[in-house]
């Protein structure tokens, strides 16, 4: 007898397409809507998803990545049954719990305590069950002092923490997570990461949508990249993350702003890139007859992790230009920026800086490394 491979599949998306109609006419009042009621309305068709197919195995931690407007959330809502596809079908094997819009059903006029029981009822729990879980929910959300305040006085982050803490009590075979960590603070995110680690050790199927490639690479075993409603990359999480970074880098280059004050700006451009090194050039049109030097910073995810200046190498600057060779062997995968500044030698005053920071990508498949710097594996027995 042939083995039934479909028994191992939690979600199957088969040739799915989804479109939306965007009306051209906009009515600013009830009167204008009534006047234009009999006129023929025109629409623009937006193709959110275009004939996509993939499978997610049971127990897999699966990532979906893509830029805003790529179709990720539409796909998640199709899986959750909120939308129906125009073409194709989505097959779900098991009980599915969507974490798509946390806090739906919350009443801002009720207290946090009352909303716990209200939201629990929407998830199918009775009052006795919620009473038994109440202390754990409050402890996870870290909101013990605020549970008797009305929800309308909560910050958006506090509401997300409470909603997430309630939602994870729901028992399901498949969890759909849509950017659930986007609003929470760093301490809450660490707590959620521990929850994700526990999920990886269970037999639960998890589908994670995120713009954080670090999170996707850390938890997901495989992933897809969606762009303009199509799957443009399918593979392990590192491959999808690299492809996502490339798309964002090309978008950054096309949308770079024009510089108005060209005389007071340091220009930085990458003049050579190989597998092992990057050579970039810093240039400035000198406006004052005085000594100066360049300094530059390497930035990843908005954080500066390395800096260097030419203060002790005045002869390195030639024709107002300085070149630097960067070895990429010590960098982990990610998108990096180069930010440069011009300083006066006397007084070390910053007089010019980069407006448009060039970016470059480091690719990698080593799942044991994270952050910016590539640390040696000098483990001690």
Image: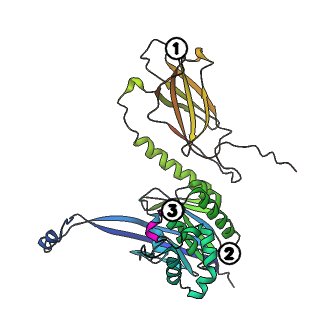
**Residue name at image x 42 percent, y 72 percent:** 108
Q: Tell which circle, 3 or 1, labels the residue nearer the N-terminal end.
A: 3
Say which of marks 1 and 2 sits in front: 1
Q: Residue furthest left?
A: 35
Bin the neighbour count of mark 2 within 10 Å (Cα to Cα): few under 14, some 14-19, many 20 and up: few
Say which of marks 3 and 1 sits in front: 3
Q: Is residue 106 left or right of residue 173?
A: left
Q: Quadrant of residue 307?
A: top right
Relative image position of residue 277 (x, y in whole percent) = 62, 34
Cα distance between the residues tagged 1 and 2: 65 Å
The magenta segment: 150-156
Which mark is drawn over residue 157? 3
**Residue name at image x 42 percent, y 66 percent:** 49
Cα distance between the residues tagged 3 and 1: 50 Å
Q: Secondary structure at mark 1?
A: loop
Which mark is drawn over residue 203? 2
Q: Is residue 147 left or right of residue 217?
A: left
Q: Tell which circle, 3 or 2, labels the residue nearer the N-terminal end.
A: 3
In the displayed structure, would residue 188 be above or below residue 319? below
Q: Depth check: 240 or 351 in front? A: 351
Name the residue carrying label 1. 291
Count the labels in the image. 3
Q: Tell which circle, 1 or 2, labels the residue nearer the N-terminal end.
A: 2
Bin the neighbour count of mark 1 within 10 Å (Cα to Cα): few under 14, some 14-19, many 20 and up: few
Q: Residue furthest top?
A: 289
Q: Secondary structure at mark 2?
A: loop
């Amino acid at each position: 007898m042939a083995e039934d491979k479909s028994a191992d599949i939690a979600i199957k998306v088969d040739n799915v397409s989804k479109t939306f109609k965007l009306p051209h006419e906009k009515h600013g009042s009830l009167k204008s809507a009534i006047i234009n009621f009999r006129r023929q309305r025109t629409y623009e068709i937006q193709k959110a998803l275009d004939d996509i197919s993939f499978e997610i195995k049971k127990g897999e931690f699966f990532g979906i990545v893509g830029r805003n407007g790529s179709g990720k959330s539409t796909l998640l809502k199709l899986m959750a049954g909120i939308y129906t596809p125009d073409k194709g079908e989505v097959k779900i094997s098991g009980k599915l719990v969507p974490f798509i819009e946390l806090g739906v059903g919350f009443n801002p006029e009720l207290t946090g305590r009352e909303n716990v029981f209200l939201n629990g009822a929407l998830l199918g729990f009775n009052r006795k069950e919620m009473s038994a879980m109440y202390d754990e929910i409050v402890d996870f959300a870290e909101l013990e002092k605020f549970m008797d305040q009305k929800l309308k006085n909560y910050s958006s982050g506090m509401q997300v923490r409470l909603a997430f803490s309630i939602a994870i009590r729901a028992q399901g075979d498949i969890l759909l997570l849509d950017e659930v960590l986007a609003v929470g603070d760093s301490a809450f995110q660490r707590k959620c990461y521990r929850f994700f680690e526990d999920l990886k050790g269970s037999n639960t199927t998890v589908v994670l949508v995120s713009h954080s490639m670090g999170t996707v690479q850390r938890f997901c075993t495989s992933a897809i990249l969606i762009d303009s409603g199509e799957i443009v990359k399918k593979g392990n999480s590192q491959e999808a993350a690299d492809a996502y970074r490339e798309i964002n880098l090309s978008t950054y280059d096309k949308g770079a702003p024009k510089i108005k004050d060209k005389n007071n700006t340091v220009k930085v451009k990458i003049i050579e890139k190989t597998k092992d090194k990057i050579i970039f050039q810093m240039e400035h049109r000198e406006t004052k007859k005085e000594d100066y030097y360049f300094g530059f910073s390497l930035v990843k995810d908005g954080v500066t992790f390395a800096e260097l200046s030419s203060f002790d190498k005045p002869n390195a600057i030639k024709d107002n230009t300085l070149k630097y060779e960067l070895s990429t062997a010590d960098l982990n995968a990610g998108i990096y920026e180069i930010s440069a500044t011009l300083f006066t030698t006397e007084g070390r005053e910053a007089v010019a800086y980069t407006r448009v920071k060039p970016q470059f990508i480091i690719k990698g498949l080593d799942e044991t490394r994270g952050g910016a710097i590539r640390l040696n594996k000098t483990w001690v027995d």
